[in-house]
Structure formats: C-alpha cells, structure tokens
Image (cartoon, helix red, strand yellow):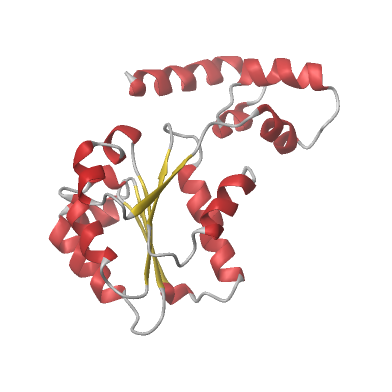
Amino acid sequence: MIIEGKEYLNKLITWKDKQLIKIVTGVRRCGKSVLLKMYQDYLKNNGVKESQIVTINFEDLDYEELTNYKKLYNYLKEKLIPNKMTYIFLDESQNVDQFPKVLDSLYIKDNVDIYVTGSNAYMLSSEIATMISGRYIQIEMLPLSFKEYMESTGNMNDRGIKYTEYLQNSSFPYALQLKNQPDEIRDTLKVFIIQLL
C-alpha cells in the first residue's frame, strides 16, 4: 500500500533542479524510501528518461561494494550524462564510509540533482552538517497525520471511529497493512522503539 505523501512530494518538486542537496530525514519506516520512489515516478511522467535517474539503496547487497566512498563516487561519475540533468537517489546513506566527501564532490558537478535519505542521527551529525553546510535543504518526514490516515483508508466519515483506529493501529504507514491485527502492530512498534534506543 502506497500512501500519497503529497505535502512531501510537493516539497521535492519545489526543489527540483536547484543546486542544493535534498536530504530527507525521519524515523525508520515513516516512508522516506517510498517518497523517493514516488518522486522518481513523477520525474518519469514529466519527461525525465530512465537513464537520467540513478538509484542506490545501500541496504541492498547488490550495492555493498559501493559503501566505499571512492568506489561510489567513481560509479556515480560514470552515470552522469553530459549536458543533461542526472537525478541521483541515495537511500540509507549512513552505510557509506566518508559519505560527505561523495556529496561534496557530486555537488560541484554540473547537471546533478542529489536526493539522500539516512538515519536522523547520521544525517544530522556535525560531520555531515559541517561538510555540506549551506549546500543542502532538509525535508523532515513524520509518520502519518490523522488527516493522512483518514485519506489513506479511503473513508472520510466516522471520524471518532477512525481516530480510535489511528491511535490503536499507529501512525506509521506500514501499520495500515496490519490494520486490526493488534499483535502484529505491537510487535512492529516494539522493533521501531528498540531501534530508536
């Protein structure tokens, strides 16, 4: 199930092709990766060719060797298309050693539009903030608001009942798939909480 994150999607659209690194932050499982996918679909639907989009999720073992910053930089440099904008999406970037060096080097290239996600603690660390200071915009994602929850369930009636469900089922998008499965929701939330500690 994909939740329409129009507010966040519109923010990315607003910053499209601007020479700023777009950093999407938020708690784990709040929908950052899904947002990047929605934005890539938007780009394709608006004339951007597949060859202009480079996507790497560093949790995918297919990209494990690219967690070395020099290999990553060289790989991305090879993907750049002369005289055309290249859109680079780097998901779960906290897994890359010396990642700010990669961002810094890509930032100075022409026709590169960079989008990054990672853990809040890492993305907002002083190392990254110092190295790319003045070169990025942060888009902070939150779990679903009650309004988004209502819209995603497809029923705008019975606000009282929906509010109770919202409180019981959690505001994480993933929990909508587990609707009315309290044990699974509880177990999932335990994992989220443990990861935050």
Tally of numbered tags: 0
Q: Quadrant of residue 78?
A: bottom left
Quadrant in which the C terminus is drawn? top left
Q: Is residue 96 above or below residue 179?
A: below
Picture layout, residue 102 above or below residue 177: below
Nearer to us in this view, 118 or 126: 126
Does residue 5 appear in this view?
no
Q: Residue at x 19, y 41 (%)?
A: 127
- Quarter assignment of residue 13: bottom right
Seen at 81% across and 33% down, the residue is 155
Q: Return the x and y of residue 133 as percentages of the image width and height.
A: 27, 49
Which quadrant of the figure contains the N terminus? top right
The residue most toward the front is: 134
Please give left or right for residue 115 compared with residue 149 in the image. Answer: left
Give left or right: position of 52 versus 183: left
In the picture, residue 172 is in which quadrant?
Answer: top right
Q: Relative to 12, is 17 above or below?
A: below
Task: Say whether residue 168 is visible.
Answer: yes
Residue ID at (43%, 35%):
26
